[in-house]
Image (spheres, rainbow, N blue to C red):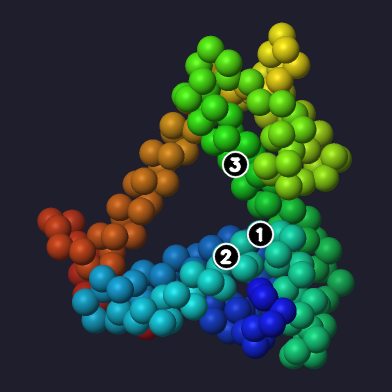
Amino acid sequence: MDKNQPFVDYYAVLRVHPECDGRTLEIAYRNLAKLYHPDHPESADVDKFNAVVEAYRALKDHGKRLAYDAQYSAHTGFTFSATDSILAEERTALSDADVHAETLLALYKRRRERARDPGVGPYELQRTLGCSDEAFDFHIWYLKSKGLIEITDQGTLAITIAGVDHVISTSRSAAEEKLRLTQFAGTPGPRAWPRDAVAA
C-alpha cells in the first residue's frame, strides 16, 4: 500500500478478521471475486472487484501483510493478539511457497529459451527473487532436496525434469481454476453455474 494513498481497510474489503489465516483469506477472496466479477450477470461490480483484487494482493504476501498490519493497527487501534506470532509463521510458509513457484518458473523459462545453457547464476536469481541470503539459501536447499533443481557443472542453478513436470502440473491446475472461476462468473457455456449458487 502506497504511503501517499489514503488508508484502506483491506480486511473490511475482504470481510475477514484481521487475524484470519491464509486459507480463510484465500477463500474470502475467491468468493468475492466470483461475486463481483465483471462477467457475472447479476452482481457484477467493477469497482468492488478491483478493490477485492487489490486487497488480496496486499495481504497474500507475508512481508506485505506484516507491513500492512502495522498500518492497520495505527489507523484502527486494533491490537493483534499474542497468537499472531503463530499466524506470522503460517504467513511465512505461504510466502515461501510463492517464492518456490517463482524460482521454478524463472528456471523453467531459462531452460525453455536456452536449452544448451539452462543455468542461472545464484546471485542473479537471488536478485530476481529479492530475498535475503538466509532465505535464498533455504529456498535453494528445499528445491534441491526435492529434486526440482540442480547445480550444474558451472555452479549455476537449473531446473530438473521433475521441476519441469512440477511447473506444468501447477500451471495446468491454475488454468483449471481460472476456467472454474470464469464459468462461475456467468460466462456463457454448457457448465455455467445456476443463479442461486453465489451467496450474498
Instruction: Identify the image quadrant of residue 154.
Output: top right
Position of 180 with respect to 137 (left or right) is left
Give amino acid for label 3. Glu
Give coordinates of residue 149: x percent, y percent. Answer: 64, 23
**Circle 3 — which element?**
helix
Image position, residue 189 (x, y; %): 14, 58
Q: CA distance from mark 2 to mark 1?
A: 7 Å
Task: Identify the residue position indicated by label 2 in the image.
Answer: 57
- Circles 2 and 1, Cβ within 8 Å, touching? The answer is yes
The residue furthest top is 153
Crowd around label 2: few <14 · some 14–19 · many ≥20 (10 Å): some
Disc sitting over residue 102 in the figure: 3
Marks 1 and 3, how far apart at CA: 13 Å
At horizontal 34% and vertical 82% (from top left) the residue drawn is: 45
Amino acid type of the residue that numbered disc 1 sits on in the rendered structure: Asp
Dot 3 and dot 2 residues touching (CB under 8 Å): no
